[in-house]
Image (tube, grey):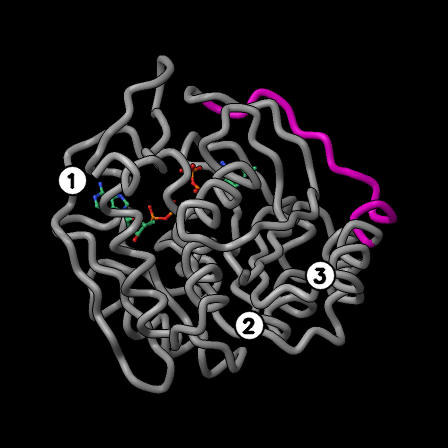
């Protein structure tokens, strides 16, 4: 059985964070292990509270998994404080497998999930450990100081981040206008495009995409193929539409089982 480790925050509503990652890996036939960085009280209308876990327990969670199960891929999601970032950097230092880093900054509801003072450590400590970065458009704009208004701009941002950090880069297009075009750069440009689905229930798409990429990498796919298959999975999960809660509901991880 192939395994992955997700290092991320808990989402009480089950749509994003650790919960989305475990559902995704399980749906794709990969055994998920986890290190929880923060607990969020969250639902489909927004984030009500955030509690960062103590750095020592995050370090222990990661070490417990790495020294025993040796995951085939790692995904990193919400890592809100500089202290936790430093500890993750130290705990992953000897890890040789693929590391997919989703630079989660702000939930789509508008709540910050990364503290302002943590941005610099995210870039200096964790980006160099990552083999694949998955910013959305607002995150890529902040990271590159560029305005992104087209797939051509996504391409420029992906190349700039690749040059700066030496990792492959997927600039996701869910916040764009027109088609949902995700631009991937690994030294060559790959564009993965789908129609933009008219469904407000997209909570957790970014977490799901990054954990699906990590799962497909654990299964042995190359990066570009893992990104393509992960996008297909997210697209099907949005298309299969759930309508839970009063706000922006989650996507449907049972989609493959329903077919
Ligand atoms: N309405 C939609 N229709 C089709 N694909 C979407 C839609 N919204 C997001 N996606 C896809 O979901 C994935 C996550 O993208 P995005 O929403 O940009 O990330 P995040 O959740 O981190 O903000 C991408 O593959 C994107 O193209
Ligand atoms: C605990 C936690 N981690 C990450 C997110 C962000 O999820 P994402 O899939 O990037 O996007 P939205 O669901 O916010 O649209 C989160 N909300 N909670």
The residue positioned 28% from the left and 38% from the top of the image is 255
Query: What is the secondary structure assignment of the residue under circle 3?
Result: loop
- How crowded pointer 1 is (Cα within 10 Å; few <14, some 14-19, many 20+) is rated as some
Bounds of the magenta span?
46-59
Which residue is labeled 2 in the image? 98
- Please name which of the two marks, 1 or 3, marks the residue nearer to the observer: 3
Position of 111 with respect to 84 (left or right) is left
Instruction: Answer yes or no: disc 1 within 8 Å of ligand 1.
Output: yes
The residue positioned 83% from the left and 48% from the top of the image is 55
Label total for image: 3
Q: In the displayed orientation, state which residue is furthest to the bottom.
A: 187
Q: CA distance from mark 2 to mark 3?
A: 15 Å
Query: What is the secondary structure assignment of the residue under circle 2?
Result: loop
Query: Horizontal and vertical percent for residue 186?
Result: 38, 81
- Please name which of the two marks, 2 or 3, marks the residue nearer to the observer: 3
Of the numbered discs 1 and 3, the one sitting upstream in the chain is 3
Does 238 lie within the magenta span? no
Which residue is labeled 3 in the image? 69
Query: Horizontal and vertical percent for residue 251?
Result: 33, 34
Query: Horizontal and vertical percent for residue 96?
Result: 65, 78
Observer-nearest of 19 and 141? 19
Of the numbered discs 2 and 3, the one sitting upstream in the chain is 3
Query: Horizontal and vertical percent for residue 229?
Result: 29, 61
Which residue is labeled 1 in the image? 197
Instruction: For the residues labelled 2 and 3, say whether their Cβ atoms are less than 8 Å apart.
Output: no
- How crowded pointer 3 is (Cα within 10 Å; few <14, some 14-19, many 20+) is rated as few
């Amino acid at each position: 059985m192939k395994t992955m480790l997700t290092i991320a925050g808990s989402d009480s509503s089950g749509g994003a964070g650790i919960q989305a990652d475990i559902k995704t890996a399980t749906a794709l036939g990969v055994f998920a292990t986890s290190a929880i960085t923060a607990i969020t009280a969250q639902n489909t209308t927004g984030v009500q509270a955030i509690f960062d876990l103590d750095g020592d327990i995050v370090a222990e969670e990661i070490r417990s998994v790495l020294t025993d199960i040796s995951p085939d891929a790692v995904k990193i999601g919400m890592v809100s404080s500089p202290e936790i970032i430093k500890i993750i950097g130290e705990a992953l230092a000897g890890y040789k497998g693929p590391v997919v880093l989703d630079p989660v900054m702000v939930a789509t509801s508008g709540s910050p999930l990364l503290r302002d003072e943590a941005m610099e450590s995210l870039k200096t400590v964790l980006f160099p450990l990552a083999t694949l970065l998955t910013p959305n458009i607002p995150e890529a704009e902040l990271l590159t100081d560029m305005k992104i208004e087209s797939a051509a701009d996504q391409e420029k941002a992906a190349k700039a981040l690749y040059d700066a950090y030496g990792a492959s880069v997927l600039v996701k297009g869910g916040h764009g206008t027109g088609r949902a075009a995700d631009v991937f750069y690994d030294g060559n440009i790959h564009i993965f495009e789908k129609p933009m689905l008219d469904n407000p229930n997209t909570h957790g798409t970014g977490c799901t995409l990054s954990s699906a990429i990590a799962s497909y990498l654990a299964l042995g796919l190359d990066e570009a193929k893992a990104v393509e298959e992960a996008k297909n999975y997210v697209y099907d999960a949005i298309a299969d539409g759930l309508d839970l809660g009063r706000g922006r509901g989650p996507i449907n991880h049972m989609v493959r089982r329903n077919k």
